[in-house]
């Protein structure tokens, strides 16, 4: 097993010929160990845990599930602001690579994924506010001058 601060890309039985200059071989466990990438914590063995604000491509689970991914380098990528929680978990309403997409039923507004129902309420608010502004403008342009004219004629 790899020590803390390092992770293993491949099992010991496929390590021959794969030792890169950035890798070390742990003779005790027979593991090929690499330095932990920036933006992640490596508690040892094959685990690479992305820090808050980072997303992991080629997780240890993906490497175990797909032999073609066994020697793929782990990539730790920065996420959009507040999109990724600790451990590579996407924030609520987020999905996809680097948690950069909104889930179905969610929409991107000001860099945040917002439930569509919330947007409908906001649309209603804007509609009502627009109506009030239009009513005030109509009063200022059409009704107020007529009222002033009537008021002026009543004093004559």
Image (cartoon, grey):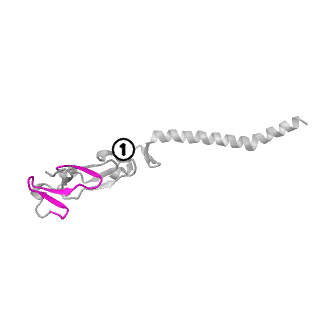
Highlighted magenta segment, given as a residue range? 19-45
Residue 23: x, y in percent?
A: 17, 60
Q: Residues within 10 Å of mark 1 (few under 14, many from 20)?
A: some
Q: Quadrant of the C terminus?
A: top right
Residue labelled with disc 1: 91
Above or below, 133 relative to 71 = above
The verdict on residue 34 being magenta is yes
The residue nearer to you, when weighing 57 against 106, is: 57
Instruction: Farthest residue to the top: give it.
Output: 154
Q: Residue at x 57, y 42 (%)?
A: 126
Measured from the top left, where is residue 141 in percent x and y? 74, 44
3 above or below 153?
below
- Tally of numbered tags: 1
Q: Residue furthest right?
A: 156
- Front residue of 139/73: it is 73
Question: In the picture provided, is 144 more to the left or to the right than 82?
Answer: right
């Amino acid at each position: 097993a790899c020590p803390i601060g390092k992770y293993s890309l491949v099992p010991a039985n496929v390590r021959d010929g794969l030792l890169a200059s950035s890798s070390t071989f742990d003779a005790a466990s027979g593991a090929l160990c690499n330095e932990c990438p920036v933006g992640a914590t490596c508690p040892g063995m094959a685990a690479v845990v992305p820090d808050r604000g980072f997303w992991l491509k080629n997780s240890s689970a993906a490497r175990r599930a797909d032999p073609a991914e066994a020697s793929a380098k782990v990539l730790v990528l920065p996420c959009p602001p507040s999109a990724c929680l600790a451990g590579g978990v996407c924030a609520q309403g987020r999905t996809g690579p680097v948690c950069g997409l909104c889930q179905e039923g969610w929409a991107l507004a000001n860099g945040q994924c917002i439930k569509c129902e919330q947007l409908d309420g906001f649309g209603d608010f804007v509609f009502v506010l627009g109506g009030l502004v239009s009513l005030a403008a109509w009063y200022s342009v059409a009704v107020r001058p007529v009222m002033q004219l009537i008021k002026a004629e009543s004093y004559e």
